[in-house]
Image (cartoon, grey):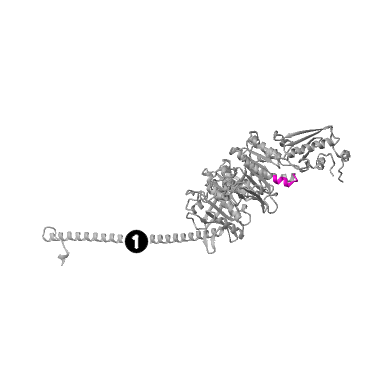
Amino acid sequence: MREEMPSTQGYGASTDTEAVETWELRLYVAGQSPKSLAAFANLKRFCEEHLPGHYEIEVIDLLENPQLAEGDQIIAIPTLVRKLPEPMKKIIGDLSNTERTLVGLNLRPRG
Amino acid sequence: MTDPGSTLVPLPKSPTGISGLDEITGGGLPRGRPTLVCGGPGCGKTLLAAEFLVHGATEFDEPGVFMSFEEPVADLVANVAALGFDVDRLVAEGRIYIDHVRVERNEIEEAGEYDLEGLFVRLSHAIGKVGARRVVLDTIETLFAGLSDTGILRSELKRLFHWLKDQGVTAVVTGERGDVGTLTRHGLEEYVSDCVIVLDHRVDTQVSTRRLRVVKYRGSSHGTNEYPFLIDDRGFAVLPITSVGLDHEVSEERISTGIPGLDAMMGEKGFYRASSILISGTAGTGKTTTCAHFVDAACRRGERTLFFAFEEAPSQIIRNIRSVGLDLAPHVDSGLLGFHAARPTLHGLEMHLATILRAVDDARPVAVVIDPITALLGDGVSDEVRAMVTRLIDGLKSRGVTTMFTTLGRMGSPSQEWTDVAISSLIDTWILLRDQELNGERNRLLYILKSRGMSHSNQLREFLLTDQGVELVPAYPGPEGALTGSSRIQQEAKSRQAEAEREHRLERLRCEVEGKRTVAEARIQALQAEIAAQEAELAAVLEADSARQRIGLEAEQKVARGLRGDDAPTTTPNGRR
């Protein structure tokens, strides 16, 4: 039962939309690569659509802070980490796959 | 990919510091290139990689990075610590950097294009942190389980190995053995083609044997055999056959067997030092006792000895040997005699071999007993076992150790004969202990089947276990072979009886002669007395005769005087005429 309409976000308990006040998102990139830029743009768009006003995006460039890669077990670039709400979620890739990104962030229930 | 191996410059190598492996590879792994180490689970890949890193940091001044995809850092440190390496200290000193890369498929959602730049960043950061010259990736194939896009993975791995080469680090990459046709499950050998080492872990009759083989070493010659290796409390050790040869020095010195009778059979001198001696015999023929004598004699000379027991506990051996009047306990107390007891099934043969050689290296004994070596061999002797025993004997000889092996024979077992035959060509002195059944009893016989380089008795000796140890008694040759035990005693009694009878007859004869002589002498005396008597009579008669003559003369003179008137007239017989 795949639903493309944004209305599916109203499934209440099955998504994390209402879980906390502010979502903490961390996007790991390595320099200004096209994939990194695409990922940031996509993420920004999803947040504006689904979490307007209560999200924070922290972009970490591993070329500048390589020591931070170990902490969140980063191997792939780009990687999006949802720090809050719990549990932690990890999505890798440039987020060009909207469906998987939203499912991964639990903004949309797993179809 | 360039291959400088074809030039005349020898390929630079990074020594692993693992005993044996550097000999096989001619100096170590290719410097500045990745090496693939693959094998099934539990075959020692991680350990080999870890040792490569630790030795590099401690012995060759090459710091290293260990990137673990499987074990958390603490587990890894604990595992390596169990082998005597203090990795925590190396980490604290900045000589080793450990990073645990955890990839959980169920925690990761893939949404779009990505690459593994994060891994590169981490590795690069780690390398920079300790100035690493060596890198271990264990086991990078785990990524295939964590990430679904194998296309991306493959291209990224290819990039990773190129990148490692560019960094100039010597890398060890481990991989799980593939099912059929491939060395690794995901075909890592495609990317790592400079040096490939395969580890194997086989179980044969419930005893496991580890083996190592260098499948490929681009630009370098290498041993291509399968080499057994072991992992013990001191780490990884490969046992290359080639490292032991026939070039050990020989000794002219002789050492006592500890049994005077046996020394006597070998020209009163005993064994050559650093030779190998085989004592073979069926159960209960006194093999261990013979060994105990040998050990006891060495300890009495103040020499160190090691006794490897594979069938009896040391305390049991000491107790049993005490029953023949030998006390080994003081030698154990003084430290001259070391016991190593293990069940043969505890390890594979390689492990036993390495344990023996390591113990010998630690204790530096002059004499070693292995009782019995057959316990290690199992049924029959394969080429592999023979190679193993060859290495053991060579290893001991090259260390100048006189070694006494025992082999246990089973009555009438052809495979046992075969065992003896297979081993015996490696043996310098072969002493056989045999049972002989005769007249309802079993007796022990000993003979020297061969003893290289010395003259030795060809005679059978009866082997007696007395309260004062082993005694060798010449066996009586009888019509049905040598006589032993009560037959010998009977024979001895018979001989003694005959001897006594002869003595007796001689004595009687002697008496007879003596008697005769006495009689004869008596007779001689009697005759002499008779002669003496007659002589006396004769003398008396002669005396009387002469007296009468004198008287007669005087009378005539008187008569003559009377006729002439000088005197009163006398009558004479003449006058009466």
Identified by mark 1, the residue type is Ile
**Residue B198 pos. (x, y %):** 64, 49
- Residue at the extreme bottom of the image, as rendered: B577
**Residue B527 pos. (x, y %):** 33, 62
Magenta span = B147-155
Question: Which residue is more in the foreground, A72 or B525?
Answer: A72
Magenta stretch containing residue B148, yes or no? yes
**Residue B16 pos. (x, y %):** 60, 43
Question: Which residue is more in the foreground, B361 or B19?
Answer: B19
Chain ID for label 1? B
Q: Main secondary structure of the magenta part?
A: helix
Circle 1 residue: B524
Magenta stretch containing residue A111, yes or no? no
* Residue beneath the point at 49% across and 56% down: B457
Above or below, comparing residue B178 to residue A83 in the picture:
below
**Residue B164 pos. (x, y %):** 64, 42
Would residue B264 be found to the left or right of residue B35 on screen? left
**Residue B178 visible, this orientation:** yes
Question: Which residue is more in the foreground, B339 or B475?
Answer: B339
Q: Give the number of callouts.
A: 1
Above or below, comparing residue B512 to residue B114 in the picture:
below
Q: The C terminus of chain B lies in which quarter of the figure?
A: bottom left
Within 10 Å of disc 1 (Cα), the crowding (few <14, some 14-19, many 20+) is: few
**Residue B293 visible, this orientation:** no
**Disc 1 on helix, strand or loop?**
helix
